[in-house]
Image (cartoon, rainbow, N blue to C red):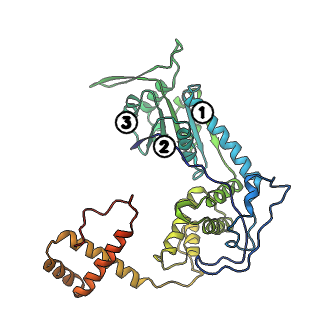
Amino acid sequence: MSVTSATAMPKAHSSAVATESGSPAAPGSSSPRARTVPPDSRAYPRGSRADSCSSAVNETLPLSYSCPAVAPLETLRRKQALIKDRIRSVVHQEANGVYLHGRPGSSKTYLIRTTLEGLGQRYAYSNGFVTPVGLFDLIEENPQSVIVLDDVSTIFEQPKALQILLAALGTAHHGSRTRTVRYKTNSMDRVAYFEGSIIAISNLQLAGHSNQVLDALQDRVHVVGFEPTDEEMEAAIYEIASTSPRGVDSGDAIVVAQVLIEQCRTLGVRPSVRLFVDKALGDFRLWKSGRSESHWHDLIHAGVQQAVVPQQHELRDITRREQIEAERCLVRDIVIAHTSREDRLKAWSARTGKGQSSFYRRMDELKRASSDRSPRQPARQAMQLV
């Protein structure tokens, strides 16, 4: 079980960006003839998010690309607004709990956490496996907070945990917000007084769990199903791409989004924000840094299909690069393990068969990399390159 508390303010996504140009080119290469897609004044009102389609990244997208329609993004925002209002009802103590379920990879957790943070609400976040006593501990340790239970579906299969949830989400007969939650066994008798709220997130409907006690639980919380359409997910992906996610330039990120969405359509796979942010962008970053043999198009194709697929692009030889990186790692380990110059060179020669010039060359490279590191990034474990 992982539990964290958070109060940081979120960063809002900027508006969606869309443009077009020639066929996709690898980052860093010269782009083909470009032209901006003019927003349709009927579909994209002036000043709207979709009106930003004629942005400065218009040279990065292929000619087949067109700005995603504003309607899916607007309907998605309306659905999200209802969810955020349910979260507000919890924060403002108009409700004791919310059960949000729906499509995997649709940013349910992100939406809830950023809404709570935007409201300045302190909350405890738990994901993974939670036992009944672990749930009781959470309630006891956070008596006046919002507790977020993420992907903890096993709770709803445990009668003891359900009884604890029923007690924590009930309403006192005298109108007080304080609910008495008791955990009693043969060896202990513990009582917690809970005034907070509980938000549960799952991919499963509450009714999909096999326990009759769930009827009583459903009566105590707002149950919200979130099932965005594929078109709404595509619009969300393009909007996220416009914010330069994971340090990828917005122009590159939009091209990655387009390639991913086209692959999903071709293979009949439902697109998701997680598929874009956690996987497709990671494939692109790996390729752009020169650390993959396969082209990022092929990596995304294989990721969507979840299989080894015939590659459509030439492989890249990265043997030499990987050898250099391995030697740098070896030098770092030798420097940590040995203090004398003689012992370091002896260990280096024994492992590589190379002399001192190559050892010091790799050490100099590590020093330069260390000096280029951001001041906020912690240095590796107490390594002195001397």
Dot label at residue 88: 1
Q: Amino acid at mark 2?
A: Ala
Q: Residue at x 31, y 73 (%)?
A: 367
Residue denoted by label 2: 8
Q: Secondary structure at mark 1?
A: helix
Relative side of 298 to 373, left or right: right
Mark 3 and mark 2 lie on one chain; the one further toward the N terminus is: 2
Marks 2, 1: nearer the viewer: 2
Structural distance between the alpha carbons of marks 3 and 1: 26 Å
Residue denoted by label 3: 134
Structural distance between the alpha carbons of marks 3 and 2: 25 Å
Q: Secondary structure at mark 2?
A: loop
Location of residue 34 (image quadrant):
bottom right
Q: Is residue 287 above or below residue 170?
A: below
Marks 3, 2: nearer the viewer: 2
Location of residue 209 (image quadrant):
top right
Q: Is residue 313 above or below residue 209?
A: below
Residue 205 seen anywhere in this rendered image of the structure? no
Q: Amino acid at mark 3?
A: Gly
Mark 2 and mark 1 lie on one chain; the one further toward the N terminus is: 2
